[in-house]
């Protein structure tokens, strides 16, 4: 059995792929399995993967029958994982040479189920590097603590986790985007102990990434949030009601945040896109359980969870106009 399996989903990543694969090949922890899943690339990515597999038996190359998106590609690879622990590495990112060794040492010696990596943001346009700040003065958390911190990314989602947890909770393929968020939260929630380790994950930030782009796909976040809620409802966990209440409050704040984004950028969308976005709000509003939203939130001006889209829009637009008058645009 390998100590760590790394899953890398690949789609048209030829520009950066060798750097990613070289970082795996050069890991100081040598007893590893590297599963690379090509999601029907149309460039030379698949050939590059085969090239590495020919000279290093730790690389296992798979190919999806049709382009399915990252979540389904990763889940396909997860079926073949033989490591005690599983990690994820995107095809345009890379590990420091000792990343897996640092994580494995913490996992084995500190009796924890999940080792969070140090996230280094690499800015593609100028080569600048910045360490992502973890908004906690701790380096060790319970699973429930890590779950709550991950909701606003005070604790990010790049880590090495026990294989049995990952296989029990594979990537959420019900939503094409933002599936990583849901998977991360379930993995944290089912870990007794989560520890920060010294291993570094280098995350490439592209100027035109989903985070920066003004696109209708941003609103898929609401669908991913609903999927997360449904998965939490299906769990048999101690403190389940408290977790659901906390998450529903978070989900409602996200929905209001999505509408604020739409309000600011609505003229950037076509008429058809505006109709699609509005239809999504109509679909989402009735799914909010008002009783679960914290009183400190729902009784604030602009934050009451109305079920009617028309009523919701009236009060949100009024609230946003008041913010503008008061000079509070952010």
Image (cartoon, rainbow, N blue to C red):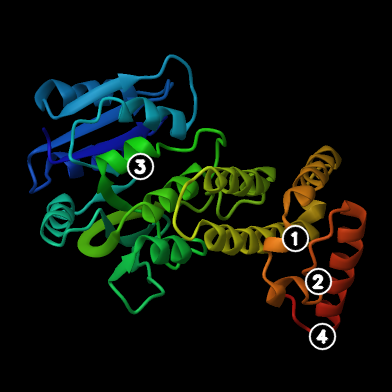
Residue at label 1?
A: 290
Q: Cα distance, mark 1 to mark 3?
A: 38 Å
**Residue 330 seen in the current view:** no
Judge left or right: residue 28 versus residue 225: left
Image quadrant holding the N terminus, namely top left
Judge left or right: residue 41 versus residue 152: left
| The one of 162 and 240 positioned closer to us in this rendering | 240
Q: Earlier in the sequence, mark 4 or mark 1?
A: 1
Label 2: how many Cα within 10 Å (few below 14, some 14–19, many 20+): some
Residue at label 2?
A: 302
Residue at label 4?
A: 326
- The outermost residue toward the bottom is 326
Residue placed at 75% from the left, 60% from the top? Answer: 290
Q: Nearer the viewer, mark 3 or mark 2?
A: 2
Q: Cα distance, mark 2 to mark 4?
A: 14 Å
Q: Cα distance, mark 3 to mark 2?
A: 38 Å
């Amino acid at each position: 059995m390998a100590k760590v399996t790394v899953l890398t989903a690949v789609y048209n990543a030829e520009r950066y792929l060798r750097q990613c694969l070289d970082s795996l090949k050069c890991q100081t922890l040598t007893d590893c399995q590297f599963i690379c899943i090509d999601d029907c690339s149309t460039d030379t990515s698949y050939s590059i993967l085969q090239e590495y597999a020919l000279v290093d038996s730790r690389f296992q190359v798979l190919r999806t029958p049709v382009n399915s998106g990252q979540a389904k590609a990763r889940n396909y690879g997860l079926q073949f994982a033989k490591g005690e622990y599983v990690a994820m590495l995107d095809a345009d990112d890379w590990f420091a040479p000792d990343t897996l060794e640092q994580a494995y040492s913490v996992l084995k010696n500190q009796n924890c189920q999940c080792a969070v990596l140090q996230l280094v943001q690499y800015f593609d346009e100028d080569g600048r590097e910045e360490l992502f700040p973890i908004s906690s003065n701790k380096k060790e958390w319970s699973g429930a603590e890590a779950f709550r911190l991950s909701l606003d990314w005070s604790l990010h989602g790049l880590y090495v986790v026990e294989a049995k947890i990952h296989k029990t909770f594979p990537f959420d393929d019900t939503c094409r985007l933002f599936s990583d968020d849901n998977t991360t939260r379930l993995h944290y929630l089912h870990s007794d102990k989560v520890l920060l380790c010294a291993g570094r994950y280098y995350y490439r930030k592209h100027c035109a990434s989903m985070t920066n782009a003004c696109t209708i796909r941003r609103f898929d976040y609401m669908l991913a949030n609903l999927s997360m809620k449904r998965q939490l409802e299906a769990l048999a966990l101690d403190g389940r009601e408290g977790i659901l209440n906390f998450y529903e409050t978070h989900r409602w704040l996200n929905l209001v945040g999505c509408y604020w984004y739409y309000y600011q950028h609505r003229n950037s969308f076509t008429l058809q896109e505006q109709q699609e976005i509005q239809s999504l709000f109509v679909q989402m509003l009735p799914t909010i359980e008002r009783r679960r939203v914290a009183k400190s939130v729902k009784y604030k001006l602009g934050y009451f969870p109305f079920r009617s889209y028309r009523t919701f829009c009236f009060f949100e637009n009024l609230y946003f106009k008041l913010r503008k008058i008061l000079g509070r645009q952010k």
